[in-house]
Amino acid sequence: MHKALLAAAYLALSGLPALAQEVVLGAVVPLSGASATLGDDQRRGIELAVDNINEKGGVLGGRKLRVIVEDSGGRAPSALDAAKKLVTVDNVPVVIGEYSSGITIPVGQYLVQEGRVHLNIGSSSGKIRSLGDGSFSLIGLDNVSTGFAAQDVVDNKWKKAAVIVPNNAYGQGVAEQFQKAFSALGGEVVTTVMYTEGQTTYRRELQQMERSEPDVYVYSAYGKEAATINRESFELSINTTPWYAIYLSMCTSDADPKFIQGQYGLDLNYIGPDGAVYEAAYKAKYNEPFKTSFNGYGYDAVMMAAAAIEKAGSAEPKAISAALKDIGKGYNGATGDITFDADRQRSKQPYLKLKIEDGVQQR
Amino acid sequence: MVQFVVDVLIRAVDLALIAIGLSSVYSLIRFPNVALVQYATTGALLALGLQMAGLPLVVAAIVACALVGIIAVVLNVVVFERLLRAGSAIAMIGSLALSMVFSAIFLVTAGPRPKRFELEINPPLRFLGARLTEHQLISVGISVLAIAVFALILFRTDLGRCMRATATNSVLASATGIDTRKVTNTVVFLSGVMAGLGGIGLSVKGEMSAQLGLDMLLPVFAAAIVGGLGNALGAAVGAVVIAAAETMVTNVNFGPLFGETVLFIPAAYATAASFLLLVVVLLIKPYGLFVAEVKRG
């Protein structure tokens, strides 16, 4: 009698009993703020993966998979609050996120410290490498992307580059790595501007860069800030010099096509050999082609996590982490081959060379 | 060089509009209204909302400015007149509190993301080598016109005379039959209109964000103080000085000094320049460049 009462009370307190049957994961992405467009696209990838898994019967013998997606607001403090809520209230074993490196790093540190699994699906600062056991990157870090960018810029016969990047962990990494790779190839970075995030104008920064008379402007900026930079470079008519974007779809997600005409850039190759099914599912659900190139990483993260849970036979963080290391040896994801190196970072990352014509990315 | 002048002018006019409002209200009721910079954001927000509701930008701007003027008067009567009875320090703290309330309202109504007016953007015009967009030109023109009209009111009309009389000695002005309360509220209305116009000008040239007003707080106060707090047209000169300092700091190439081609101070430090200039001016001339009031022992 006593026990039955206690059990009833426990069930009442722990919310809906049906939920106990679910396997719940967490995600922290920017659904508002400068990167909201990209964060929402990450969410789409996550959603598609959850649909896919549940259609195929869920995980661990028929239990439904659910991912709680929290908004980071594009700010580290609120991202940390969201991560804490996922860990302490929802008690999730795996947290996916965030987008900007400056936010991913503290979130990852917190998760590793709490013994949870962290899956990085959008950040590429080199500092992520040292987050520790339990933190995995499904996306190539900045040494990989800037090396590719430097080669592409040199191939276009541009010798003097002016660089503008956000003044945060991501931007610092890109600026440093690009300079290293570009000078090794015989180019010269004539000026590097680190812009403060969240400003309403970047006129002064752009005018400073212009004074160094570069052959090419190399930039990487978040959606809405990139839109401001592109508009003002048009207003100052310095867009007549070529612009090269590191992650073109991130830099142009919110821009007016008029201001980004003719821009060059690299972007993540979001379609792996087996990605066609995923691309078709995305189009069917959202009635448009890929909004940005970041959704596929959200999809792969959930799919890999589910595979790891299945393989481990449990939803315990330690078991999932061990299983992920096994799965991450040539995993065939929507974004191509995912292989982790000894530091649990994706070691291979294909990129695309792109150019914008009439508002559309051309390969 | 021409580009430098253009950049200073673009920055100075909006700064001047708000600083003149601040200074002229101060001359009458002896307290610096911190919430004035939030009136600028209010103006931009209202104009944006009215434009989205379908009004043409010019009409939206005029209606928004008038509304901001009315809000300024209402707040002056309801809040500041009462607080002033307790002293100017209390009124200033009150205005700070009010400006926080404004910030919260902006976040709730407009959200944290910056917004833009729906405007067609065209390639810049070339003017003696300097680049200037059509919107910048029109916006600067309107702001200069507004400042000129205010100067005319101040020096060529009865209202201006009453205002200056009240500023110099309000008891005496009152004794000669001037309705000082009415004069004050008229000036408060004008200051609201000008701040609103300044905010709209800033948003037309860049973006409207909830932070717009607070970002202007320091430069506006610096401009008003450098120009001599209480001296309306001194504030306009102060605005030019501050804008020039900000633009200069980010435009001087320190490269040759360090053996590099280009080396600039990061643009984020531009506001620090206005701070520094303010301190220097206060050290040399504690009452600002142009002392407005006649000092009586």
Image (cartoon, grey):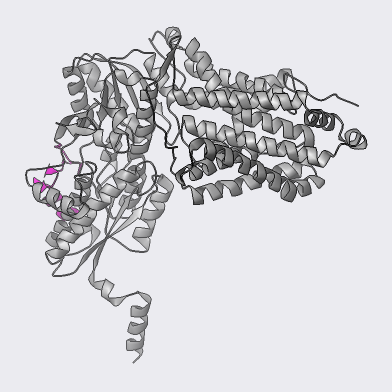
Tell me the residue at 58%/23% (across/down): B12
Residue at horizontal 52 percent and vertical 42 percent from the top: B45
Q: Position of residue A337 (x, y in %)?
A: 10, 43
Residue A149 falls in image quadrant:
top left
Left or right, B280 with respect to A287, comes to right
Q: Residue at x 19, y 14 (%)?
A: A157
Q: Position of residue A117 (x, y in %)?
A: 26, 53
Q: Can you name the residue that lies furthest to the bottom here?
A: A1
Numbered-mark total:
0
**B203 left or right of B240 in image:** left
Q: Which residues are magenta?
A: A321-349
- Given residues A294 and B33, the one toward you in this image is B33
- Quarter location, residue B8: top right
Residue extending furthest toward the left: A273
Q: Nearer the viewer, residue A246 or B84?
A: B84
- Magenta stretch encompasses residue A319: no
